[in-house]
Structures are given as structure tokens and as C-alpha cells.
Amino acid sequence: MRVLHLNSLLTGGGTDDQCAKIARGLVQLGHAVWVAGPAGREVSQVIRDLDIPFHATPPEGPLKLRLIFDAARFIRRKKIQFIHGHHGRDLWPTIMAARLSGKNPRIVLTRHMAKSPSSWFSRRFLLGQCDALIAVSHFVAKVMRDGVDEPSSPELERRHRPPLLGDHSKIHVLYGGIDTERFRPFDAQPQRQAWGLEPHHYAFAVVGGYSLPRGKGQREFLKAAAMIHKEAPDARFLIVGRGSMADVLQSDIAQLGLRGKAWLTPYCHDMPTAMNAIDCLVHPQIGTEALGLVVCEAHACGKPVIASGLDGIPEAFAVGNFGQMTPPEDVSALANAMRHWANEARATEPARAELHARVSASFSLGAAAGRVAALYLQLGGKPA
């Protein structure tokens, strides 16, 4: 099959990561795959490093017309059978490029977010213009088909998520993947030492960006840490990531009496090593979460996970099922879970290996790419 993934951002984040990984997996399965997007971005270099053919797109231009016409020409030149868009901003450019190419490629879109497209126009007409819409979890599919309302939620984005109109049979639930060859159990003592962790320390960590106004629950994590740190003297509380809340979080650490017990680590590019250096991943998400592949990454390394039971996170957690789910924004419940796991023995090597195997069966890159390839075949794309 000949496939073009259109991605106009490539600046980092979960959507760009999954775009690159699915493309890589399809290449490994023997398909001809290109990623089209702007050169000079963080993920465009990652794509090249993964030996995925990359097509540099021009500046978008008014109404993204330069991007659209360039993609249409590429479809004609390379005889593309499937064009696949990922970001919300790329949904209509993907459709328009396919239409303008005159080659009738199948149009596949992926919704990586646990909320509806923002525009009424997209919610009304998007399904009618694509051949398939991939939802990355059953929860995302529920939002697309039925809508989800939580009017009392403190998070504005959670209060009203309306459905899409149209042919809901085009919505397919396909989980993404992680690199289980890299996310596996191994010794990471040098990283623990670099972070100032002693062998007897039990390291809880939140992994991910922390952008204003609220991040991904890092402040709730620190509040829970303040509730247990005296009775769990060997516990340490790490915030691994980067973002605009650094000063806020440093202030919280000081005000909550957590100096020497909690800290922000330098940004870590080697996430498999980071996962193996900690003892328990805490994922106290407070906004929306389509799936939460970071949970799978921790489980693949044989680590327990304490996670908010919201949106698609329970689906990711269920595969490993090692750790504990807590109600979103319930700091007391989060503290109780952390208290419990601080006193649990670390998993044995055989147990960690078994957990890795379980995650690999469902979430390896090969499994994820195979699901996408099967959908392409189901759509029956005509040779260009």
C-alpha cells in the first residue's frame, strides 16, 4: 500500500509521536509510507532518524492553500492510495488535498483527543467527507458517537463534548502503540543516581508536560505527597517533564514543606530509562485524556501505576492492571494510594517480564500498525 500521513505541526506531543510511530510500523510491515510536514521541526528530524521517507511541505499560506495544493500534487506524483490526517487543524486540508488530487485516495482521519472538533461545521460534515475516522479509545468513540456531558466538572473542556453527526459506522476504535523494544524492564541505577535517589528511596513520579493553567495534575500530586511524606520517609516525589508551570511547582514544593523530598528533574529525552529509574508512575490527569499511553509505557517497564480513572485512561490501565485507579482530582484518594504503594515490595524480575509481555501483545508498534493496515485493507483502496 502507498500511504501519505499529513501532519502540519511536528512540534512534539502525543499526536505527533503516534503519527511517527504508526508510520514507522507501517514501513516495517513493508508498505510505502511518507510523512508530509514542515521541515526543521522537532519531530520532522525524528521521522528522518526513523528512516521514514519525509516530504517537506511549503509554508501553509492563506487558508492553508499552499499546503493543500502541495499535498495534492504529491498524491498524484506518488500514486498515493491512502491519505491519513492526525491533527484537528489537518482534517480539512487532508480532505481537500485528496479531492483536488483527482486520484480518489481513501481518506482516513484519527481523533487523538477526548473531545469533539471545536467547529459546528466539522461536527456536522466531517464524517460525510472521510472514509474512516479512527478513535484512539472506546471513550473517544463514545464522544464522537454520543457526546459526553459533565456540566459540574471544574474543567471547562469536560463540561460539554457534543457528538459528530453522520454515519457512525465510519468510526473505528484502534489503539495506538508504544515502542516495547525500548520500553522494557532494565536496570537504571545511573539515572537514579543522577536524580539524587538512594537505593532505599521509593520514587513516585509524574511524567509529562506542565503547562499553565493546571498542567496534568502535578499540583494535586504535590498536595498528596505533603499528606504522606512524614509517614513514608523514604518516599520521593519527582516531576519529570517541562512546561510553563515550573515556578508555580517550585513554590508549591516550598510551601508544602517538601524540599528535599520533591523536585523537578531536568528534562529527560530517554523516557524508557526514566520509567525504569522510578518505582511508581503517578498519572493524576485532571483535564481530558484520550487514552494515556504513558500508563502503558510504565507497565511495559514493569512499574505500578496510580492513575485518574477518567476518559480513556482505564482502557490503557486494564492491559497491565498493575497499580490503582483513583477518582480525578481526589487528593485524599491519591494520597491513600501512594501511601499503600510506598509500603509494597517492588515487583520481581519475572513479574516485570510477564507484565512487559502482556503490554507488548496489545500495544507494540507492530500490533498498532497492523491494526491500521487492516483498516486500510478493509476500506479497499483502489490502486492509484
Image (cartoon, rainbow, N blue to C red):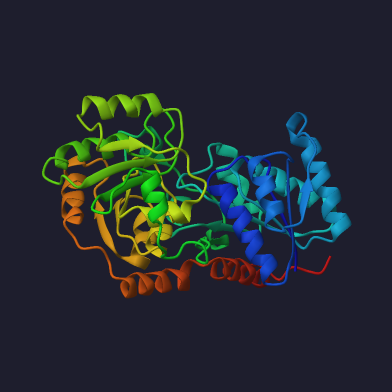
Q: Is residue 312 visible?
A: no
Residue at (21%, 50%) from the top-left corner? 338
Decide which of 134, 265 is in the foreground and name it: 265
Q: How many marks?
A: 0
Please, is residue 123 above or below residue 48 in the view?
above
Decide which of 143, 207 is in the foreground and name it: 207
Relative image position of residue 382 (x, y in whole percent): 78, 69
Would residue 284 be found to the left or right of residue 126 on screen? left
Would residue 347 be found to the left or right of residue 357 on screen? left
Assign the C terminus to one quadrant of the image. Answer: bottom right
Would residue 38 be found to the left or right of residue 301 on screen? right
Residue at (26%, 40%) from the top-left corner? 329
Assign the N terminus to one quadrant of the image. Answer: bottom right
Relative image position of residue 114 (x, y in whole percent): 45, 47
Residue at (80%, 47%) from the top-left corner? 71
Q: Is residue 273 visible?
A: yes
Image quadrant in which you'd find residue 366:
bottom right
Relative image position of residue 191 (x, y in whole percent): 41, 50
Decide which of 7, 340 is in the foreground and name it: 340
Image quadrant in which you'd find residue 196:
top left
**Looking at the image, which residue sits at the far left?**
231
Residue at (46%, 73%) from the top-left corner? 361
